[in-house]
Amino acid sequence: MKKLLYIAVGIAACTLSSCSDLIDITPVENNTADEFYTTEYEMQQAVVGIYARLGRNGTNTDYPTDMYWQAAESRSDNLYYATLANAQRDQADMRTFHVTDVTGLNQTIYARLYQMVNDANTLLEKAPEEYTRYRAEARFLRALAYFDLIRAYGPQPVLDHVVSSEEAKTMERQPIEDAYALIISDLEYAGSNLEPFYSGEEAGRVGSIAAKCLLGEVYVTMACYPLYDNTAYAKAEETLAPIMNDVKARFAPNFADIFDLNQENTWDIFSVQFASGNQGLGSSYPSFTTVGSSSSTPFPEWAYSGFTTQGQDFRVDSLLINSMKAANDIRLDVTVMQGYWTSLDHGATPEEDPLNWEDRDIIKKFLIKDNTNNTIKAWNDYPLNFPILRPADAYLLYAEALVNNGKAAQAKEWVDAIRARAGVAVLDHNPTMDDIMYERRCEFLGEGKRYFDLVRMGEDTFVSTLKAFSDHYNHVSLMGASDPTVKDMLLPIPLTVMNIHTSWENNPGY
């Protein structure tokens, strides 16, 4: 099922675009497009090619690894930096707030997002109106790309059509309200022209519930910093209310089921699809979440022989772990590995055999826990899908909208459902924003949402939270980090882009 999808993705990606490292911030005319978009089969290949931008896309790392782990989760208060890298590492620069306009990872993320916009615009220009489903999928993916662009980089040119190279050079950054207008239009179209979900060989393709859930997240984000749109929470409630029964049907009874390889595409709303087998379709995410860069196999009882890690020594916040432990939160054991054996030959307990035991709190929810697996061939060949949207998103987004619309009593049902599945006592009061933010932190730990939550809570919360976190772990004195500031609420526009668009001003502080 996933294999068929990703074979198509690979073909489409190779057909429609080159694997260039150059940053082209705006879609450029492609002379071969006229020859490609001639049959329904080619239209389908083209839209699946846009999905390919979320996967490995001919590179070593996938989009979730680059954006949601390295550029988001790593910069939040969920992870602290424990051991200095032995060389320059972009992920470490992200964590220590040393990212610049020439940081390679930053350039890669920016380029890939505009590649998605480019691909979507090309399809929408070439696909006749009767190809409604393909157009709807393309518009969802364009909306997702723009949502991440403006959250990470601030105002951008708003491109709803293919433009020439010369036209691209003259385009200016536009207010983020303009980008949100396009995002909302795209998601409304997708929500009205897709089936709720797709299954079988089409599992992993976006459906209308995903479009409406993402639109709810967009409105919730617009209600917060920097727009503070006072109509947005009402729109979020109006958008999410009609889909909650559909969402509830996909709410996994057990938290661990969400990350069970045998239950993929059952409990999610929209996930990036991955598959092992050394075909360039696997996920690199687990190798960046598990300890520091290593040439030897850590935790041999868990990983396939030859597994190596690619990330840095980023560990889960001990204060959060203690809080979840005190509540007997089931999510902790599913999400975090609290130490591991370094050899297959070891004693019965860590206390009896401390030499072969490593105390380290790291994210494990995406690691396939099977050292006999002979399908996984490399550090970036893991098969577990990455959920961009799952029912818990809708539950907590809807609850947040209700709370802010003066309906906290109605929000309690949805927050309590999250807590009950986690084995945590239901609230003895109507939920507050603090309750919702805490549940989001525990529920999505390791999934790249916390950083954006801190941003939308505003400048004071962002800086004070991350400053206290940095001080607690001595990031400045021990790791050479910079104190987090308002500057760090956005990433810099890459220098390669600024050199083309000489009239632009980079984001403040860069």
Image (cartoon, rainbow, N blue to C red):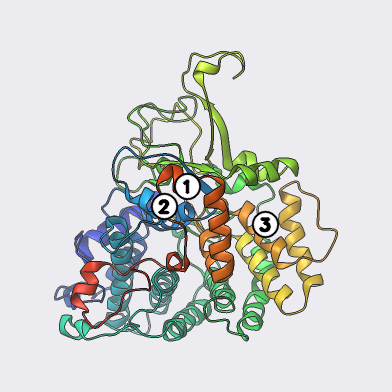
Q: Is mark 1 on a helix, strand or loop?
A: helix
Tell me how far mark 1 sits from mark 3, CA to CA: 26 Å
What is the number of callouts on the image? Answer: 3
Depth check, front residue: 116 or 21: 21
Mark linked to residue 439: 3
> Which residue is tagged 1?
475
Residue 338 shown left or right of residue 201 in the figure: right
The residue at the point 55 percent across, 53 percent down is: 77
Q: In which quarter of the image is residue 496?
A: bottom left
- At label 3, counting other C-alpha atoms closer than 10 Å, the crowd grade (few under 14, some 14-19, many 20 or more) is some
Residue type, label 1? His
Residue type, label 3? Glu
Residue 442 pos. (x, y %): 63, 52
The C terminus is located in which quarter? Answer: bottom left
**Mark 2 or 3, nearer chain start:** 2
Depth check, front residue: 133 or 267: 267
Mark linked to residue 442: none
> Which residue is tagged 2?
96
Residue type, label 2? Thr
Dot 2 and dot 1 residues touching (CB under 8 Å): yes
Q: Which of marks 2 and 3 is in front?
A: 2
The residue at the point 39 percent across, 39 percent down is: 84
Tell me how far mark 2 sits from mark 1, CA to CA: 7 Å
**Mark 2 or 1, nearer chain start:** 2
383 is higher (above) or lower (below) than 236: above
